[in-house]
Image (cartoon, rainbow, N blue to C red):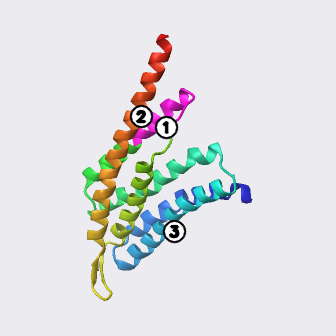
Amino acid sequence: MKRHLPNFLTLGRMILAPPIVILLFFPGKLPSAIAAGIFLIASLTDFFDGFIARRFKLESSFGRFLDPIADKVLVTSSLIMLIALDRVPAWIVMLLITREVGVSALRATTKTWDTTLSPSRIGKLKAVFQFAAVVPLIIHYEYKFIIPINFHLIGMVLLYIALILTLWSGVDYFLRFYREYQLRENGDEQ
C-alpha cells in the first residue's frame, strides 16, 4: 500500500475534478467555497505525491506519466468551467491549454529519442501560480473579514502571473527541444 501512495494521491487529484465542476453548476457562495476547498486539497496532493515518492524512493514510470496528466485534468477542467461562469477570459485559458498540449507533444517526441525534457523550475513555478489562481477564482465572491477581500481580483492577478510563467516556460521547453533536436541531427550526420 505504502508503495502505491504517491500514485493514489495523483489519481485522487483526477477523481476530485468532477465534484469541483459539479459544485460550480450551483450559483452562490457556499458551493463555490466548497469547490475551492476541494480544489485546494486536490492541488496539495501535487506536492505530497512528489514529496513522498522522492523521500521514500517510490518514484515510478507510471507516476511520472500520470502526474502531469492529473495536473492538467484538475486545472483545465476547473478553468473551462470558470469560462462558462464568465469568471475568466477564454483567451487566457486557450493559451494555457495550448502550451500544455504543445509541451506534452514535445515531451512525447523526446521519449521516442530515449531522452526526456524534464520539468524546469519555471514550469514548476507556473504550476504553483496556476493552482494559486484557480482557488480564489473558484471562490469568486467578495468576503468581508477585517476588510473586504475581492477573491476574483486576487485570482485574476495570480492568473496573469501564471499566464506569463506559462508562456515563458513554453518558450523554454521549445528552445530545449530545439537544442536536443539539433544535437540529434548533428549526431546523425557524423
Q: In front: mark 3 or mark 2?
A: 2
Residue beneath the point at 37% across and 45% down: 169
Q: Is residue 159 magenta?
A: no
Return the mark for residue 3. Answer: none
**Is residue 105 in the magenta section?**
yes
Query: Which mark identifies residue 41?
Result: 3
Could you tell me which secondary element the residue under label 1 belongs to? loop
Pointer 1: what residue?
117
State the SS at label 2: helix
Amino acid type, mark 1: Leu
Task: Report the residue at 33% width, 87% height from top.
Answer: 145
Percent x, y of residue 47: 54, 60
Amino acid type shown at disc 2: Arg
Q: Which residues are magenta?
A: 101-116
Q: Are marks 1 and 2 in contact (CB under 8 Å)?
A: yes
Residue named by callout 2: 176
